[in-house]
Amino acid sequence: MTDVSNDRRGTLSPRWYWLQALLIAGSALTAALLWRDIPTTVTTHYNFRFEPDGFGAKSWGTVFLLNIVQLCLLLTMLGTNAVIARTTSVQASDKGENEAKRREFRFVNSVFLYGLSLLLTAFFSYIQATMLYGWPSRVLAVVTVLVMLLVIGGIVGLTVTVRRLGLQEQGSGDGEGAAGGAHWLAGGGLYYNPRDPAVFVPKKYGIGWTVNFGRPVGWVVVGTLILIPFAIVTLVALMT
């Protein structure tokens, strides 16, 4: 039987993300096959009552915009999962129970990222179908509320799991590694340690990961995340 997890790194295998890739491809292929049936004017925005209040001419940009967003989301989640899997902070040089806890910490974060990615990918596909194929917007309102509740529930579940397993200490302490207090700036909100090879490290407070601004790659990651929305807008403008 194929092992779909990465035991050595403590994260889900990238093969899990094939489901999201198939969902994106299926949504885009459906739109392409039904191109002639899509109205010449499509909905591009809903108000807070989920009533259509924005419209645009049918084009590659308006039809496939959400597929582009889905693809960017997939690549971001895959990249984050890969970085977490390869994270070897200077605090990870010791073995035993601490290393086992760090691996478990990576795993629960990896599972959360995967679930969030799958949920949002499916949600964007549903929004696309509502915009293009005339699905009732009142159902979209219900789906949106359910998605919000699931995201909140996932965050709460992640927090409870981290605390129940005693993993909340992975990002705090006074050692010389990622937990070293001397390397945390802005009250523990920023981590800067050029000697730490890790690009991502556990947050000092709370759950999740943060960037090591002491590594040049860390700045590249932050810059890329900032540029992605602008790249999407530019691409859609060129396709419209």
Image (cartoon, helix red, strand yellow):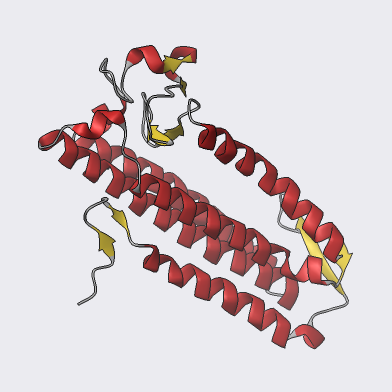
Residue 59: quadrant of the picture:
bottom right
Residue 16 vertical placement versus 9 (above, below): below
Residue 184 x %, y %:
41, 17
> Which quadrant of the rendered structure holds the C terminus?
bottom right
Residue 177 vertical placement versus 139 (above, below): above
Measuring 44% from the left and 24% from the top, which residue is drawn there?
Answer: 194
169 to the left or right of 17: left
Residue 122 x %, y %:
53, 66
Asked if residue 192 shows in the view, the reply is yes
Asked if residue 47 shows in the view, the reply is no
Measuring 30% from the left and 24% from the top, which residue is drawn there?
Answer: 177
Total marks placed? 0
Residue 78 x %, y %:
47, 56
143 to the left or right of 160: right
Closest to the observer: 225 or 86? Answer: 86
> Which quadrant of the rendered structure holds the N terminus?
bottom left
Closest to the observer: 147 or 219? Answer: 219
Residue 68 x %, y %:
67, 63
Residue 184 vertical placement versus 104 (above, below): above
Measuring 76% from the left and 71% from the top, which residue is drawn there?
Answer: 63
75 to the left or right of 82: right
Instruction: Determine the residue located farthest toward the left in the rendered image.
Output: 96
160 to the left or right of 51: left
